[in-house]
Amino acid sequence: MSALFSPATLRGLTLRNRTVVAPMCQYSARDGLANDWHLVHLGRFALGGFGLVIFEATGVTAEGRISYGDLGLWNDEQIAPLTRIVDFLHSQGAAAGIQLAHAGRKASTPVSWNDTARMSEAEKAAVGYQHWTPVAPSAIAHAAEDPDYQTPTALDAAGISNLIDAFVAAARRADQAGFDTVEIHAAHGYLLNQFLSPLANQRTDQYGGSRENRMRLVLEITAAVRAVWPAEKPLLVRLSVSDWHPDGWQVEDSVALARELKALGVDAIDCSSGGFDGAAVKAAANYQVPFAQAVRDGADIPTIAVGLLGDIQGAETILTSGQADFIALARGALDDPNWALHANHELGASDYTLWPKQANRVSSRDRSLGLRSFATS
């Protein structure tokens, strides 16, 4: 059996393989409610053989959404539509995760395909359009010259306390919805990443200044979520391991934070990067894998590698060489929702048991055409 398709256990959760679908915002919800688009979008990855499917960044508060089209878990009405999707993923053998998020100063941004400046009020209502002033660690806009981003309101002590409570409440709702894991989103220049990075955090209280202070909110939220998240269910955190900026958060900072997160009961780190204006990101195939290895080695914690990882043999090598423990695809999964099925065959599987039984007739097509396990040299 290949490393990629070996089972993996985190606490009481055993994944059928080490392929992960990373969170991808769909900007297709109204009032935070999941709908048929989310069911079909996420369900196809379970049909495609992935081990873990993580739902998109889901606002723990209404004002924490990146846009008005994001999913939410700030009220009980949002539980049932998510449960419907979770149940389908489970029926197809995939585990379900959800990313709990707050966008901070990058909230209340437009949905690119809705030209709201030209829409009537009725058209805006039809897509659930809303606009609000975001909050952040400091009153500094993400990109001062970009009209999509506003100058936020700096969070006060009460706002921070309410934020922690919102993450806890959302985690409780995620458990009610049946999710197998939650992922705390502390990456991509969103609120928790804003607290971590000196590029966005200019506070002078206990949440700003030193690295210890800038890590405080992430650690407080993690501890609070772990306390209410069932002990048998794993907890993930997504980090931007590097801001790709000389004045920002660095790899060694992420290693130090990951050690603290592990001590609080976090089970794996999802290793991404970037998210701030002025970052010099050098994107290429496997470009974030060194971040996953640095955190894995430095903090002795399982890591998820992500970022242009669609090469199948390369993905296997990442695991066998000890650079990461899981392989996550986002755009690659959009391009090929059956990537896990195809990878399983390329890495030596001779049976079709990972395919849904309704699609098992693919084996007869392959036999007729001499493909996959029926290929002759």
Image (spheres, rainbow, N blue to C red):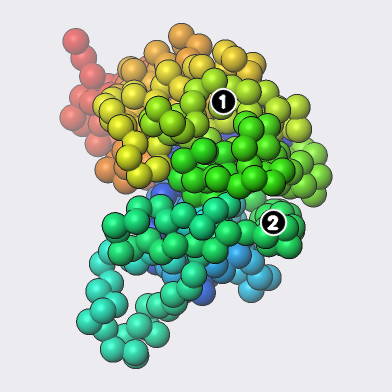
Q: Is residue 318 above or below residue 339?
A: above
Q: Is residue 128 left or right of residue 178?
A: left
For mark 2, give the secondary structure.
Answer: helix
Kind of residue indicated by mark 2: Ile
Furthest residue in direction front, as rendered: 204
In this picture, residue 2 sits left or right of residue 334:
right
Is residue 13 among the parts visible in the rendering? no
Camera-nearest residue between 42 and 127 = 127
Circle 2 is placed at which residue position? Answer: 160
Query: At x 33% / y 63%, what residue is drawn?
Result: 148
Q: Is residue 182 left or right of residue 126?
A: right
Rendered residue at 51%/74% (across/down): 31
Seen at 55% across and 45% down, the residue is 202
> How many angstroms separate mark 2 from mark 1 (CA)?
22 Å
* Left or right: 250, with 174 as reference point: left
Residue 274 percent coordinates (x, y): 40, 37
Q: Residues within 10 Å of mark 1 (few under 14, many from 20)?
A: some
Considering depth in this image, is 142 or 29 the residue closer to the camera?
Answer: 142
Above-or-below relation of 120 to 45: below
**Percent position of residue 26, x then y:** 39, 59
Question: Residue 137: x percent and y percent?
Answer: 58, 52
Instruction: Report the amino acid beneath label 1.
Output: Asp
Label ID, residue 253 = 1
Count of labels in the image: 2
Closer to the chain start, of discs 2 and 1, is: 2
Residue at 44%, 31% (x, y): give it.
Answer: 247
Q: Position of residue 328 (x, y in %)?
A: 44, 33
Disc marking residue 289? none
